[in-house]
Amino acid sequence: MKILVCISHVPDTTSKINFSEGDTKFDTNGVQFVINPNDEFGLTRAMWFKEKQGAEVTVVNVGGPETEPTLRKALAIGADAAIRVNTAASDGFSVAKQLANVFKDGGYDLVIAGRESIDYNGGMVPGMIAGLINANFVNNCINLEVDGTSAKAVREIDGGKETVSTTLPLVIGGQKGLVEESDLRIPNMRGIMMARKKPLSVIEPIEASAETTSVKFEKPAPKGAVKLVSADNLDELVDLLHNEAKVI
Amino acid sequence: MSVLVYTESEQGAFKKVALEVASYAKTVADQLGTTVTAVTINVDNASELGNYGVDKVLNISNDQLQSFNANGYAEAIKQAAEKEAAKVVVISSSADSKYLAPLLAVGLNAGYASNVIEAPSSTSPFTVKRTAFTNKAFEISQINTDVKIIGVSNNSFGLVENTGSASAEDFSPSLSDLGVQVESVDKATDKVTIADADVVVSGGRGLKGPENWGMIEELADVLGAATACSKPVSDLGWRPHSEHVGQTGKPVASNLYIAIGISGAIQHLAGVNASKVKVVINTDEEAPFFKAADYGVVGDAFDVVPQLIEKIKAFKAQQ
């Protein structure tokens, strides 16, 4: 089985979010970039398929050379090869078109992507890849097993979970639960040394227009101070929630 | 050239978000000088939609679509959009709508903006405001395609009543193999879900153990709220993962979020920032959540919550 794992290069969760050039660009100054958390669960599940079922795992990303350390980290975790599509990621649709093209060229059986990235939160790339390559798609996936060309997946739904069956080729939008957080892997020294020798190929993008454009960014207005209510006077809290906040 | 809106339902009845997206679609249709057509799937009675600005309803009754299926639903909505020559398709930002939307976008070759929180600021160019960076910022996004898909963030636009009535028409999309089959569903049907809830009551490690969740459930019950939890609580197995809210859990966009014994790690705040009003109950007055909250009580949950339950019961009895 050939697995393609899509890796988004995103600001670390704790990063301060700032914008530059008249609030039209994300300011990367002082920001540390990491593998998108939802993708990390997917990558670890791919490692499970590699170790238990002999799958071959390629990681892919759409981005400039600055994203390569993130791909190298994925190689150090255990992926066999990496591909970088050499273009700045603009909107989700254009990224999906680039990734669908990589899929078509590589003869993959399974695409694992995170359900959404923690920067733009579009939540569209996995489903769009599936639509573009005409593959089955399971979103919010929290467990996946593959037997030959059949797959059984569990996905989270509002208030519970659902078990589904489908066939390859398959795209999943993965999230926490696909593996336990305690099973996420940190690259060790051997992995880091081996990653240097693994192939990281850079391919040029296909022509794919962006269907949406980021015009500007805004930050939320500063929040007022919390209104503290004494634990001995909860009538006041009820009154505030009813008369001031109007939520009960 | 109408605005098409997909109105979600469950067991034949509309979800609250259906009325919210209908209200949103009416606003967009007014901006564009056109009408609203709603698509319903296996709904018993769609007449209510007229009160929220819908002019025409396309009712789909189809056994293949009894369970939610992203591929089948996307295909049905696509065919409805083509029939109506819709230039704008409005959906919610529920988990189901976010699942089908990218498939629909590919089918219609449409730009898609999710988590949209306001009516378009302009329809030429078509510009919407959406949340990004896990609610730490907003993105003003321009959709460049001929057909546009807008995913409206839950509880962001509200309900806008209109006086009107909608004409109804049966619509039968042509569906092929759905690709993904549901084998089983494991869901507590009698509970308010986080996605649908106006109020969410959430517990953290400060509750000390799963045996103490009774008071969280009782407070939620009194308020008609959904229950939720922080990440450590689901990691410890005290509560199911489906209740975990935060960056790698479920996002919450309720009107009221009550956090009990949750310190407010940045990943947790990211998942709940879209809630309108946040109340924090915590013994530690230095807990970061107090900086993000609107109202706070510094105190022991085991003292405060039972009292709060009684106060709210008394308040409800007076109403």
Image (cartoon, coloured by chain):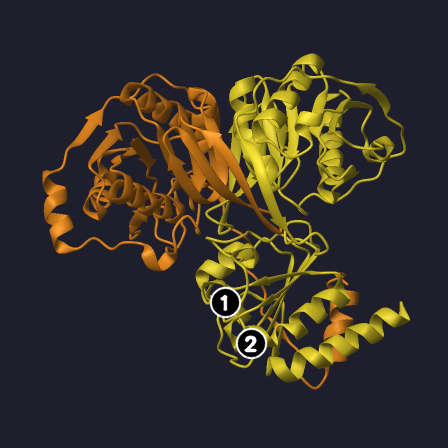
In the displayed structure image, the side of residue B112 where residue A202 appears, left or right = left
Residue found at the far front of this picture? A147
Of labels 1 and 2, earlier in sequence is 2
Q: Give percent across and percent down for residue A169.
A: 40, 26
Q: Write down the quadrant of residue A146 in the picture.
A: top left
**The residue marked by circle 2 belongs to what chain?**
B
Q: Give the residue at x 52% y 33%.
A: B141
B8, A207: nearer the viewer = B8
A197, B11: nearer the viewer = B11
- Chain letter for the part of the structure drawn in orange: A
Q: Give percent across and percent down for residue B216.
A: 65, 71
- Which numbered disc covers residue B207? 2
Q: Chain B in the picture: what colour?
A: yellow
Q: Are marks 1 and 2 in contact (CB under 8 Å)?
A: yes
Q: What's the residue type where badge 2 is placed?
A: Leu
Q: Give the residue at x 54% y 52%.
A: B250
A226, B186: nearer the viewer = B186
Figure quadrant of the C terminus of chain A: bottom right
Q: Is residue A197 above or below residue B57?
A: below
Q: Secondary structure at mark 1?
A: helix
The residue singled out by tag 1 in the image is: B233
Residue found at the far bottom of this picture? A232
Q: Write down the quadrant of residue A50 in the picture.
A: top left
Total numbered labels: 2
Q: Give the residue at x 42% y 29%.
A: A170
Q: Is residue A234 above or below residue B266?
A: below
Say whether mark 2 and mark 1 are on the same chain: yes
Q: What's the residue type where badge 1 is placed?
A: Val
